[in-house]
Image (spheres, rainbow, N blue to C red):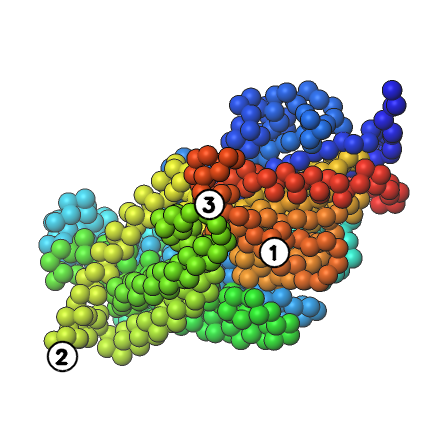
Amino acid sequence: MERPRQRLTGPQTDGSALRPAPAGAELELLVHGVGGATPEKMLDDPRTVRITGDDTAAIFRRAADAGKPAAAQGPRGEPVREAYVWCNLTSGDGTRALWLLLLPFMVVNLAHWMRPATHGRRRTVRFYGVLVRLAALTLTVLFTAAACEVALDLVAWQCAGVPDCARRHTWLGFLSPAVAGDAWWTRPGRRLALAALVPAALTALLWYLSHRTWNAYESHRPMSRDPGPQTDGSALARPGFWYGRRLVARLRAAHTAAGLLTVAAAVAVPTARFDHRPGGPAALDLLGRLLGAALLCCAAAVVCVVCRRGRTERRPDHRLDRHLVRGLPLGALVLLLLTLVHAGWSRPGWRSAGRLPGDAAFGTLMLAQGLLVVVLAVVARDLYRRRPDPRAAGRGLGGPAVALLACALGGVMSGGVAQRVADWLDGTRVLLDGPPVLLTWQASVIPPLLAVLLLLAAHLARRTARLARTERDRVRHEHPGEPEDPARTRRIAHARATATLTDRAPLVIGVLCATTLSLGTVALAGALATGEPPEGAARGTYGVVRAVAETSQALGSWLVGIGFLLFVTWGRRAYRDASARRTIGILWDVGTFWPRAAHPFAPPCYAERAVPDLTWRMATWTARTGGRLVLSGHSQGSVLAASAAWQLGPSARGRVALLTYGSPLERLYGRWFPAHFGPPALAALHRDVACWRNLHRPTDPIGGPVRVPGGRGPEVDHEPLRDPLAYGRTPEHPLPAPVLGHSDYQADPAFARERARLLARLRPDLPTQRPEHPER
C-alpha cells in the first residue's frame, strides 16, 4: 500500500522548527451568525465535545472526531468539522438588556467607523475621529446633566422646597423645611450635596461596567505578527486593530471625569449665584471662584485627552497611560467632594425657589452637538469627494447622520425622562416649575416624529406590496410547466419583496435625520424665543395649534415612560427568545462588532475576543498540519470570518479558503462602513485568501452578493440560490419545501458542492514558504 506523501508545514507560531505533516489534512471551521446556534446543530450531531475555549466562546467537534490527530480527515473523505460558538459574547441573562439604555453611546460609536473611504488624507481622517469623540463626550455630559436635573433640580430643589409636593411624597420629608423644620439636611446647599450622590453613583456605575468589560474584551491580546506593508485594503488587517485597550482606558478616564465634573458644576453654579449677590459671604465667594476655575481647568484637560491621537493599529499597543487613567478621574472626584463641602456650608437666608439654572446648559449642549454634526458632515463630504463610492450610504454622509441620530436620541431620552419625573412629582402640574423649557420641548417632539415614521412605514409597505405583485410574475416564469399554486406564488414573492426592505435603510435614515433636524431646530428656537414650554407658548394662538401643543407635551412624557418599559421588556425577550433575537440581533450585533473607539461606555465589542480566537485557531492548525482549511461563516459569522482572515499572516492565509453565505459583508457593512468593507477592501481580501465563494438567496433580508470588483481569479458570488428548493411536490421533496430566507444554507446541495470546489482549489501540494519572519 502506498504511503501518503509527506511535506513540511509552514512556520510554527512560536518560531520552532518545521515538522512534516501528512498531505490531505482538511478542516472546516464553522462560524455561526446572529442569534447563535448550538454546536449540536452546527455539526449536525447530538454528541459534541469542546476541544478548546471556555464557557463564553469555544470550539467544538463531533465526539467521533475529538480524538483524531490534527491532520486527520472526517468520514467519507469530508473535512473534519469544527464549530466556533460565540453567542455567549453577546447574550446572557435578562439583565444584559439594560445595555439597551446605553443605545445612544453605541450609535455614536458607530459613526466613528462610518467615515468614507479615502487614501492618504491622514489629518482629515484624524480630524473626523476627533469630531466624533467630542460628540460622544457631549452625550456623556448630557446624560449626567439629565440625571442632575432629575435628582438635584426636580427632587431636591423644587419638590423638597415646596411644602405641598414634599407632603405628597413622604420620603422627601427629611429634606423639606416645611416638614422637618430647621433640620440639618433642609438647607438648600446640603440638599443639593446629598442629591448629587445619585448622578455621581450613576457615573461610577458606568465606569465600573466599562472597566469590567474592558478586562473581559479589550484585554485579550491578539496574535503577534509583523505588520504588513501599507495597502489600499482594510485597516482590519492591521495587527493592532482588535486591541483597543489603551484607547478605551484613556477615554474611560476622560468620560468618567467629565461626568463627575458635570455633577460638580450642577452643584457649584447655584451656590456661586447665591454667593455672588451683593453682601454675600466674601470668603465663600472666593472659594467658589477658585473651585470654578479648577473645574474649568480640569474640563479643559478632559477635552485635550479626548482630542489626542486615537487608536494605534499598526502594532498592538500594550502600554497604558497609568498616571492619566488614575489621576484624571481622581482629580475630578476630589473637586466634586470639595464642591459638595463648599455647597453644604451654612448660608443663612438661602431658600430654594424656581428652577436651578439649567436652561442655558442644555441649550449650549444642543447647539454644540449641532455644530459638531455640521462640521462632521463637511469633513465627511470632503473625504467622499476624493474617492466617490456610489454604493456608500448617504453618499458619504452616513457617519454624520448616525451621529445626529445619537445626539437626538440622547436629547429625547433626557427630556422625556425629566418631563415624566416632573409629572410624577407634580400630579397637578401647578406646584412645580418643572424641568428646563428645552427638555420639555425635546420630549414634545416625540409624537410628531412618530407620526412621520408611521407615514414612512406606510409608504414602504405600499412599495413592498407593489414589488410583491411584480415578483409573482417572475416566480411563475421561473417554474414553467408546473401547476401553479397562487398561495405558494404569493408567499415566495412576498418573501423576496420583504427582503429588499434592508436596501431601504438609507431612505429611512435620511428621512429620520431630516425630521429630527427640523424638529430639533423648532424645539431650540421655541425654547429660546418663548422661554415657556409648548403648552404655554401656544396660549393665545389658534385652537388647533393650542390643542396640538398640549397633546404633544402630554404624550411626550408618557411615550418616554412607556417606551422605557417596552425597551427593557423587548431587550429581555431578545436575550431569552431566539426568534426575537434574530429580529433585532443584526442591528445590535453590528453595533457591538466595532471597537469602542469613540465612547467607552458603549456596550463592549465582542469581536475583540472572537477575531483573535479564530485567528489563533487557524494559524496554529495550518502551522501544525500544513493542511487545507475552509473558513465557513454564516451571516454575522461571515464578517468575523473575513476579519479573522485579514489578521492571518501570508503563509497561513494562503492555505485558507473562505466560504460565506447569508453574508452582509457588502449589503450592510460595505455600504455603511466603506472605509473598512468598501470595494477596495473586499478586493484586497479576495487577493489575500487562497479562494473565496459566497452564497446568497433573493429571499434573504440580510445576506447578499459581495460584488468584489475586478476580474482576477474565479468569481466570488455564486448565482442566487433557489428558494424554496422546489416549487411544488417532487420525488426529492414530496412535502412542500419551506422558504428558507436567511437560514439553513447548509441544506442546499450547492453548499457541499462549493465547499468541495474550494478544497480542490486549495491544492494539497502547496509550496512551503521559508520562515524569514516567523510568527511569535
- In this view, the residue farthest toward the front is 481
Q: First in sequence: mark 2 or mark 3?
A: 2
Q: Secondary structure at mark 2?
A: loop
Q: Is residue 459 above or below residue 152?
A: below
From the viewer's perspective, tell me whether residue 272 is left or right of residue 546. Answer: right
Residue 420 visible in the snapshot: yes
> Marks 2 and 1, how far apart in space?
56 Å
**Quadrant for the C terminus in the image:** top right
What count of labels does the image hold? 3
Check residue 706 in the rendering and tell me which mark sits there, or answer none.
Answer: 1
Residue 141 visible in the snapshot: no
Residue at screen point 53% across, 57% down: 668
> Would you call the spot at circle 2 few (<14 residues within 10 Å), some (14-19), or many (20 or more)?
few
Q: Residue 647 appears at what percent x and percent y?
A: 70, 47
> Would you call the spot at circle 1 few (<14 residues within 10 Å), some (14-19), or many (20 or more)?
many
Q: Amino acid at mark 2?
A: Tyr
- Which one is nearer the viewer's eye here, 416 or 738? 738
- Which one is nearer the viewer's eye here, 130 or 38? 38
- Which one is nearer the viewer's eye here, 194 or 756? 756
**Which is more foreground, mark 2 or mark 3?**
3
Q: Is residue 172 above or below residue 710?
A: above
**Which is more foreground, mark 1 or mark 3?**
3
Q: Which residue is mark 3?
A: 727
Q: Which residue is mark 2?
A: 542
Question: Mark 1–mark 3 contact, CB under 8 Å?
Answer: no
Q: Amino acid at mark 3?
A: Tyr
